[in-house]
Amino acid sequence: MKALILKDLYVILNQKNSLLMLITLFVIASFFLGDTGMLLIFLTVLSMTLINITLSNDETSHWNRFVNTLPIEKSDIVKSKYILSLILILFMVIIVFPIFLLTNMITKTFTMVNFISILSIIISGILMMLSFVIPVTIKYGAQKARIFILALIFIPVIVINVISNGSFFHQLLEFLLLFGYIALIIAVVMFYLSYQLSVKFFKKKEY
């Protein structure tokens, strides 16, 4: 299990230049637009991107053909992706938190209590989206999963935010805050059910 997770982490580190560029763009956008919420969008975009990178690499390098010959349970192969997702979310929170503090000193967008509450909601949202993205990628492939992410998640959200002059995310977050811990509980249940579904897809798929 540890070896599977380390393999994916090495794959991600090989994309460090692209990741640094992505991080820089969101930090700059947050400063110039005066919107700390951009950092929360950053969490969502980056988590989707990193998981897709690892799944795409497995597909293009034919890793799944090789790993299926090893004395490893197929459920453990899938489980490593879900554990990796949780590790990446933790790392991203650690990275984003000091950036938030610096940006919020200028923009005064959120109080600390509000930020922590909103961050918990964002993490719930990320878990929910990963609950769709991972099984879709395993069943249909990385390319179709990218189309799924763009068509059903990022493009509609970005377009709505532009139309609403940037107020969409604040209104959405205020609405989601009403659900609080319920959203997190739902996200955890969805994440677990997604894992079970992904295991079924992985076992049935021929590589």
Image: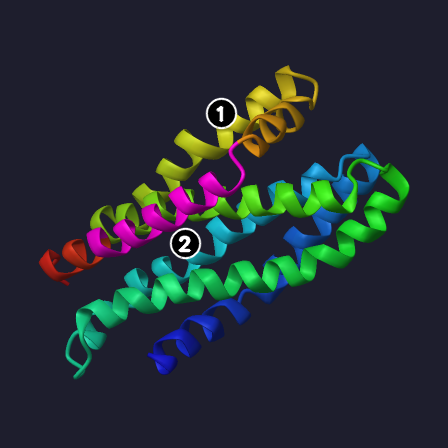
**Quarter where residue 18 is shown:** bottom right
Q: Who's the residue at 31% across and 62% down the image?
A: 60
Mark 1 is surrounded, within 10 Å at the Cα level, by few (under 14), some (14 to 19) or many (20 or more) other residues, namely few
Residue 156 vertical position relative to residue 40 in the rendered view, above or below: above
Residue sitting nearer the eye, 37 or 56: 37
Residue that badge 2 annotates: 52
Compared across the picture, whether 190 is left or right of 95 comes to left
Q: Amino acid at mark 2?
A: Asn
Image coords of residue 111 (percent x, y): 79, 41
What's the magenta region? 179-197
Specify the farthest residue to the right: 106
Instruction: Please tell me the numbered disc located at residue 18.
Output: none
Specify the farthest residue to the top: 163
**Quarter where residue 55 is shown:** bottom left
Image coords of residue 90 (percent x, y): 56, 62
Residue sitting nearer the eye, 109 or 141: 109
- Main SS, magenta residues: helix
Name the quadrant of the N terminus. Answer: bottom left
**What colouring does the structure picture have?**
rainbow
Is 188 contained in the magenta span?
A: yes
Task: Give yes or no for contact between labels 1 and 2 (Cβ–Cβ under 8 Å).
Answer: no
Disc on the earlier residue, 1 or 2: 2
Provide the secondary structure element on which disc 1 rests.
helix
Q: Amino acid at mark 1?
A: Pro
Residue that badge 1 annotates: 156
Compared across the picture, whether 88 is left or right of 42 comes to left
Image coords of residue 104 (percent x, y): 83, 44
Compared across the picture, whether 35 is left or right of 64 comes to right
Residue 145 vertical position relative to residue 156 in the rendered view, above or below: below
Provide the secondary structure element on which disc 2 rests.
helix
Image coords of residue 160 (percent x, y): 57, 20
Is 154 contained in the magenta span?
A: no
